[in-house]
């Protein structure tokens, strides 16, 4: 087997890269270790930045998103029993975000890819990237599970879009990793309940952080800060709702709508960046190269920025023979990645209660939130970062 770009992973990064290359007439093959149903159901991100929305539309993947996605013009910050709304368009010259789940983005991209004849191979695991430093990189892969058959895909370029636990990063020698783990995680639930507010609510409370999000007008997505080693099964449904109610409490008559909980899981929180994002003809994109804590809703959007930058560089190479943009790929992406790392870290430490936090730390958090609520400059900084940094 031979292709121009071998893509490992059919998450948002790999799927979108395949679409962008297809649109430019460059062939690729996507290898995905899981089956299609698994990829389409994995519950993850929910917020698309304005730039991500624009990219998906331009790639021909915006039709259902525009019909079913929910445009959000702001978020609410909740602290000290008070509520403060951040108005995105007013602060950013008209920008907003879209609530449209990662599961739906992946479904739309998979359908488009298969309609065009793929190639998109599920249940096909990349085992290793070989020869990335030379001019003929090879992807060794296995089709059909542990006893399946092994084969090789010869490529001009390889895109490692295989997430945090993939194989591609291991093929980048002499890299450097920067990381931080947080001493807490998020207990996330999906519930058959109409969202209790029409925009997302980020709550800072002495008992810990809580987030109200949504998947549709009838499905709520909610998160609670919990200790890092928490088992989701330790929390009964009633305990979860009671705790959410406490952390979202306000002085007005706002109430939390409860409903049947259909999914429950705990996500660890970490920041991780691998530099450089390239070795020879292998390029890392998305979670394969970097992880942010979910507080800033940046992970999926960073993955989109990476593959837009990579597709542009590969198209430039094929059209002109120049490696200039490929050479700039890692540095171009990392500038944006570190802005997202900074923002995600700031928002995480602003809203979560660290173990051992003192009353002084609590007051400082409230003062930082008060500053955002009372200074247009501070609020604009948050709105600009939340709605997204420019790509490239
Ligand atoms: P993915 O989505 O992990 O996809 C990688 C794919 O590679 C496959 N794979 C392999 N395939 C073949 N051979 C191998 N050896 C392979 N190894 C792995 C995997 O099966 C998978 O299909 O990475 P990608 O494409 O880089 O996308 C990144 C995003 O998924 C991630 O950043 C976001 O989900 C993060 N995130 C959020 N991002 C946002 O922008 N907004 C949010 O609101 C948001 N909320 C979240 C999140 C992540 C969360 N979790 C669970 C980590 C909320 C949560 C709870
Ligand atoms: C989500 O809806 O899953 C979500 C929304 C905002 C975040 C993180 C996750 O900051």
Image: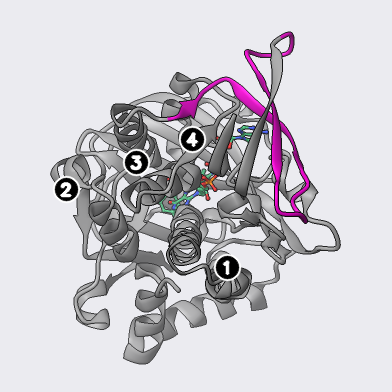
User: Separation of disc 3 and disc 4 at Cα?
Assistant: 29 Å
Of callouts 1 and 2, the N-terminal one: 2
**Which x, y percent locates residue 301?**
44, 58
Q: Which residue is mark 4?
A: 240
Residue 120 lies, with reference to residue 76, above or below; the image says above
* In this rendering, the label closer to the viewer, 1 or 4: 1
Q: Secondary structure at mark 2?
A: helix
Q: CA distance from mark 1 to mark 2?
A: 32 Å
Instruction: Give me the residue at 43% from left, 44% from top.
Output: 18
Q: Nearer the viewer, residue 201 or 307?
A: 307
User: Does label 3 or label 4 sit earlier along the sequence?
Assistant: 3
Query: Could you say whether the residue bearing mark 3 is in a helix, strand or loop?
Result: helix
Mark 1 CB lies closer than 8 A to ligand 1: no
Examine the image and state in which quarter residue 84 appears.
bottom left
Location of residue 82 in the rendering, given as x and y in whole percent from the top left corner: 34, 68
> For the residue carrying disc 2, how many other residues have a C-alpha within 10 Å: few (<14), some (14-19), or many (20+)?
some
User: Residue 66 — which label?
Assistant: 2
Position above or below: 264 against 336 = above
3 vs 4, front mark: 3
Point out the stretch of residues depicted in magenta. 119-147
Task: Report if residue 273 lies within the magenta region.
Answer: no
Quickly name the residue at label 3.
Answer: 105
- Which numbered circle lies on residue 221? none
Badge 1 is on which residue? 326
Q: Secondary structure at mark 1?
A: helix
């Amino acid at each position: 087997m031979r292709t121009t770009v071998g893509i490992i992973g059919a998450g948002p990064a790999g799927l979108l890269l395949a679409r962008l290359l297809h649109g430019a007439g460059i062939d690729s093959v996507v290898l995905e270790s899981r089956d299609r149903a698994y990829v389409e159901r994995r519950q993850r991100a929910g917020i698309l930045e304005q730039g991500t929305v624009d990219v998906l539309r331009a790639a021909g993947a915006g039709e259902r998103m525009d019909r079913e996605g929910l445009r959000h013009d702001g978020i609410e910050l909740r602290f000290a029993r008070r509520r403060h709304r951040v108005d995105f368009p007013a602060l950013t010259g008209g920008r907003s975000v879209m609530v449209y789940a990662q599961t739906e983005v992946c479904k739309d991209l998979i359908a488009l890819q298969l309609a065009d004849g793929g190639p998109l191979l599920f249940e096909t695991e990349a085992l290793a990237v070989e020869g990335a430093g030379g001019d003929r990189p090879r992807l060794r892969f296995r089709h059909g599970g542990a006893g399946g058959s092994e084969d090789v895909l010869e490529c001009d370029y390889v895109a490692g879009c295989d997430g945090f636990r993939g194989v591609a990063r291991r093929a980048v020698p002499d890299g450097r990793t920067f990381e931080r783990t947080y001493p807490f995680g998020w207990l996330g639930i999906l519930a058959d309940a109409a969202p209790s507010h029409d925009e997302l609510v980020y709550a800072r409370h002495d008992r810990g952080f809580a987030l109200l999000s949504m998947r549709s007008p009838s499905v709520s997505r909610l998160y609670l800060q919990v200790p890092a080693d928490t088992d989701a099964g330790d929390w009964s449904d009633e305990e979860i709702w009671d705790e959410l109610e406490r952390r979202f409490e306000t002085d007005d008559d706002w109430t939390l709508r409860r409903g049947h909980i259909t999914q429950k899981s705990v996500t660890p929180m970490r920041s991780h960046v691998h530099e450089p994002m390239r070795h020879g003809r292998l390029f890392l994109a998305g979670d394969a190269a970097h992880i942010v804590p979910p507080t800033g809703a940046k992970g999926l959007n960073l993955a989109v920025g990476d593959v837009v930058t990579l597709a542009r560089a590969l198209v430039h190479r094929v059209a002109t023979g120049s490696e200039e943009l490929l050479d700039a790929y890692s540095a171009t992406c990392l500038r944006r990645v570190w802005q997202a790392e900074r923002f995600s870290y700031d928002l995480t430490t602003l809203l979560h209660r660290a173990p051992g936090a003192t009353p002084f730390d609590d007051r400082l958090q409230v003062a930082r939130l008060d500053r955002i609520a009372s200074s247009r400059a501070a609020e604009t900084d948050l709105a600009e970062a939340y709605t997204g940094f420019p790509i490239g």
